[in-house]
Amino acid sequence: MELYEYADLTSRLDAIGEFDDMSDDEKLADLVDQLRPYLRNVIGATIGKGGEGKTTLASNLAYMLAEEQALRYSQGKSAKPVLYMELDHNGDGRLDLGLAATSFNDEGKALRDAITNDGNLKVVKEVRPFLDATISGKYCADIAARISKLADTHSLAAYLMLSLLLAQVSHLYRWIVLDFAPGDKAIQRTGLAAATHLVAPIRNTDNAALGGLATLTRLIRTNRRLNPEAALTAIAFVGFRKVKGEPTTELLNVRAKIEKLITDANMNPSVILDEYVRDARAIATLCRNHGKPAREFALAAAGQLHDEQGNLVPRPRDENGRFVDAEQAVKLADDYSNLARGVITRVRQRNSELRENQMQGAAS
Ligand SMILES: Nc1ncnc2c1ncn2[C@@H]1O[C@H](COP(=O)(O)OP(=O)(O)OP(=O)(O)O)[C@@H](O)[C@H]1O
Ligand SMILES: [Mg+2]
């Protein structure tokens, strides 16, 4: 692991400096059109409500996608790293990847400045093989207000600050996984402008969770000018009971409600993933506390994880000092593998449609 600084990126403030509230729509559309092809590997994990599993899903997805790239590399195929970026000021992503207690933890200061003030983009390289990550934390709480202030002068273009940043590094990454909570308008717009694919986790069955999903679908529509390509690409259930490998009525009921919500919004219900993550709260909590994504934690629980020096990592124990049930941990990790596969299949499918549309547009 090492800190890497992308120092010679073009000024994002200069780019939006061209815009004021008198700028015509066409000028903004031109900039958005230019950015779009560079952002098709950006996957946003979000939903219009807190605590639904965004960070758990995003960090595990990033880890799984990185693992796939590492495997490709070992087979002599082309491979690129994956970047995980959390915008939330709670900084839970740092915990999930075991970065909170490292010297890289600047509480999100560099990330805030990179997004809002042309600061150098700092990433922790090789957090895991083929996985880079930025650090979020309390300073990220300023992002919303700073972007809003820029919007006072530069209107909608201010919400492209993150898009302009990511478009400059996206070719270096196979995937960029963005984790953000659309609790604030400026963050909603900023995140939804950058991400081409939105993946929404659902952990709760109450109306608030459904409301969060409805909010997200509405925001995607109202944000069209900043991102005409954004779409809800996958809905993923996280933390639902599996009995003999089958979902219970709890999941079937919430799935039926969501199907209706999606069809009523004229969207294709195939975005709802069949693959889902089982309820494993105790293990999920231990994963976060140990700073390990589910697959890595499962390897540790099975006594098969080695550290960077090649030493065997001691098998993790629960709060009562008992060894973690390796079988359960492996099942949870397998759920994430299957879920990641479901997400990425849909993302790839949409990307090929987007490329086709672009070619048709160019030909006509
Ligand atoms: N498979 C699972 N089974 C049960 N609970 C889980 C599972 N995975 C995650 N959780 C729990 O769900 C809770 C919320 O997860 P997470 O922090 O990822 O959500 P979030 O949407 O990022 O929240 P916030 O809006 O606070 O950032 C956590 O307490 C986590 O332990
Ligand atoms: Mg979170």
Image (spheres, rainbow, N blue to C red):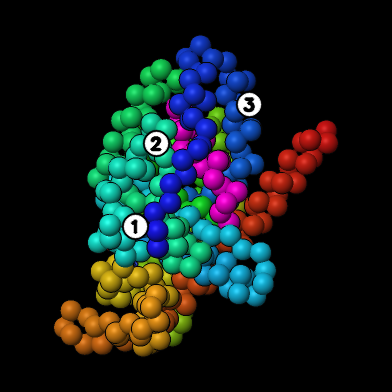
Dot 3 amino acid type: Asp
Give the residue pinned by disc 1. 93
Q: Residues within 10 Å of mark 1 (few under 14, many from 20)?
A: many
Where in the figure is residue 166, as x and y percent of width and height? 51, 42
Q: Is residue 193 visible?
A: no
Residue underneath mark 2: 119
**Residue 165 lies in magenta, yes or no?**
yes
The quadrant of the image that shows the C terminus is top right
Identify the image quadrant of residue 314: bottom left
Name the image quarter holding residue 99: bottom left
Q: Between 178 and 356, which is closer to the camera in this rendering?
A: 178
Magenta stretch, main secondary structure, is: helix
Circle 3: is it few (<14), some (14-19), or many (20+) Cα within 10 Å?
A: few
> At numbered mark 2, what does the secondary structure look like: helix, strand or loop?
loop
Q: Amino acid at mark 2?
A: Gly
46 above or below 143?
A: below
| Residue on which disc 3 sits | 30
Mark 1 and ligand 2: say if the CB distance to the nearest ligand atom is below 8 Å.
yes
